[in-house]
Image: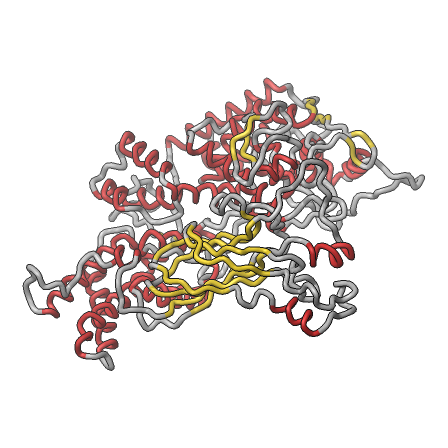
Amino acid sequence: MQRVGDNAQQWEKIVTKLRTREMPPPGRPRPDGVAYDAAAAALERDLDAAAAAKPHPGRVPVHRLNRNEYTNAIRDLLGLEIDGRALLSSDESDQEGFDNVASVLSVSPALLENYLSAARALSRLAVGDPARVPVIDTFKISKALVQDERLSDDLPFGSQGGALIRYDFPLDAEYTIKVLLRRQEYDYIIGMGEPHQLDFRLDGVRVKRFTVGGEAKGMTNPENFAGNTQGDPEFEEYMHTADAHLEVRVPVKAGVHEVGVSFVRRFWEPEGVLQPPQTGFGRTTNEYYHGNPAVEIVSIGGPYGVPAAGDSPSRRKAFICRPYDTAGRKGSPDQRGVSCAKNILSTLAARAYRRPLTESDIQTLLDFYNEGRALRLGGVPRSRQAEDSFDAGIQRGIERILAAPSFLFRVEREPAGLAAGAAYRLSDLDLASRLSFFLWSSIPDDELREAAARGKLHDPAALEQQVQRMLRDPRSKALVDNFASRWLELSKLSGVVPDTELYPEFDENLRDAMEQETRLFVGSQIRENRSVVELLTADYSFLNERLAAHYGLRNIYGSHFRRVTFADRARGGLLGQASLLTVTSYPNRTSVTMRGRWLLANLLGAPPPPPPPDIPALKEAGVDGQPRSLRERMEMHRKNPACASCHQRMDPLGFALENFDAVGKWRTSSDGAPIDPSASFPDGTRFEGVAGLRTLLVSHKEDFVRTLCGKLL
């Protein structure tokens, strides 16, 4: 115990084993709870003292920007809203699922090519190339998304289905918006039996209303719509091409705009019992013709009719001077051009590189500016040569910035003359970079950079002020979207496909609502600066009508989410949220092991080791052929010595959540047998249900807080 600091990592593991009561091994005498806590506390004191006497914070390896960070940095640097998935491949994750860990963010030749291609394309977008070739971006709506109701708060009341897309229009120009409707398995457009009105909107303003459907009346229909008979040729043609005219061409100013398409709601549901959606043959023959149409694809094409390079959000952000505005200017046009280019490129580079520039940095950018300008001069009319070549030079300089290692990699430099292994104080500029990538997953803004340049960030009051400001900024949503999704394994929800025979109520709308609940809940805890323990104990969450119905709550209407306080302790906090209960289940049943492992790994910081190979599956029936209960099957499994130690920790935690089914819906029985949510650990600790589990976790709040802090770091 005198030299715990010499092997601190092993002693940290021992502390964790003591805190989770995994030591001594089964069959050995076990101390009482007071002795456990005293031993763990003594070890922690010795470890803390050793760390204080000889601090060794380690060294941060070079950190490549991951795809999310790159996307956000481009937004904040150039004012461009991009889809990083279209430019860069996905990032590797560490064993805990985080994709922003420097040691696993490798660099391959293919990725470097992606970065170079992205730099070329984005620099042209930022400057605004009038010769830009029109492109078509296609947005596909999941077939599993039910479009029988209003889908977004940003679509009109009285609307039904459709889609809302935030799109970054690169230039002032004309663009086409085209819609294709959902088709059934045999390519008939759904819902064409009656006429429907479809609105196209730009930033909430209707630009066009179309009528589609209802024109097949009087035509000879097939006997059914299952694909094995046909109607007359006119009917067949109409049912395949009724949406061919759903296209509009509109002028749009450069920047981010909301493109909305939605149907006008024709009927309101009458009071009473609603019939569930049909499936199989009934759906094919009835709903596909007489049901509601749905949007499947929205395409945005352009730009068309591009004028000379003009104003745009990205140009306003980049072009902080205009070299050929001659009023009050001195020097030749070329001199003014170089001076302005130096101003523009050095300002952008200082933001992108997150450090002061050297003379070499500036000269490199000017070399690229001159290269781009020279390439542009050929073939350009003399009347436009100066301005066009200047823009081309700036484009080339921005391309160099976006491909620079100082932008793509986060590098923290040690002070000169530092002894090997010595601790040192992080510079304010490096601290600013860490802070911005932690809270925003992006580069520091001008205010944070200025505070760092003045050495203010080592003043606790000034640092606190910056943190509070940054948390109030909408960019702090990245902390929830990136960290919370990885910590809670929420990113797995998109890949979960519950058995539709067992859980017919599960659809894309419910999946989206589940994920949104958790994001809003965690985000509210951060914004309101609440105790982290309230992540477990809160008696409220955020629901819309779809999720409230799933939870058995009434009188909550509409697609918008609002804070709802629960009357009982079944819901509230993370433990009662359907998103987390769903990702810890199999498609056809719950899993006490998966849920127990999730709790140990993500809330208590004591993940079990991977299971040994060749572990047999649970036997459903006993020797008498009668089905065993889940508890009986798990008890048989724990008799295997290779499984016992881990399952004794995982299974009790999972049993406490058995009142929630595989999609997080409350239940009191399973397969006709009542649910028994009681559980106990080998040390005699007993608890029952989600309320008892919540109390148990709160009694170990130090472990929860330590785990959360470790995940954050």
Quarter-of-image position of residue 213: bottom right
Residue 683, position as x, y percentages in the image: 69, 24
Looking at the image, which is closer to me, 365 or 528? 528
Residue drawn at (70%, 63%), measured in percent from left and top?
Answer: 185
Please say which color scheme the image uses: secondary structure
Q: Is residue 125 in view from this perspective?
A: yes
Up the image or down, 317 lies above or below 229; here it is above
- Residue found at the very far right of the displayed protein: 624
Query: Where residue 50 appears, x then y in whole percent?
Result: 42, 31
Please name the residue shown 64% across and 24% down the image: 691
Q: Is residue 117 left or right of residue 326?
A: right
Q: Quadrant of the C terminus?
A: top left
Please tell me which residue is depicted at 29% across the width and 46% down the height of the picture: 445
Toward which corner of the image does residue 171 lie, by quadrant? bottom left
* Total residue callouts: 0
Rendered location of residue 591, percent (x, y): 71, 40
Q: Quadrant of residue 693?
A: top right
Vertical side of 448 occupied by 680: above or below: above
The front one of 10 and 578 is: 578
Residue 406 in percent (x, y) is at 31, 57
Left or right, residue 594 beside residue 159: right
**Residue lying furthest front in this view?**
218
Residue 489 visible in the picture: no
The answer to whether residue 222 is left or right of residue 303 is: right
Q: Residue at x 43, y 42 (%)?
A: 477
Determine whether 462 is above or below 134 in the image: above
Question: Residue placed farthest to the bottom in the image?
Answer: 379
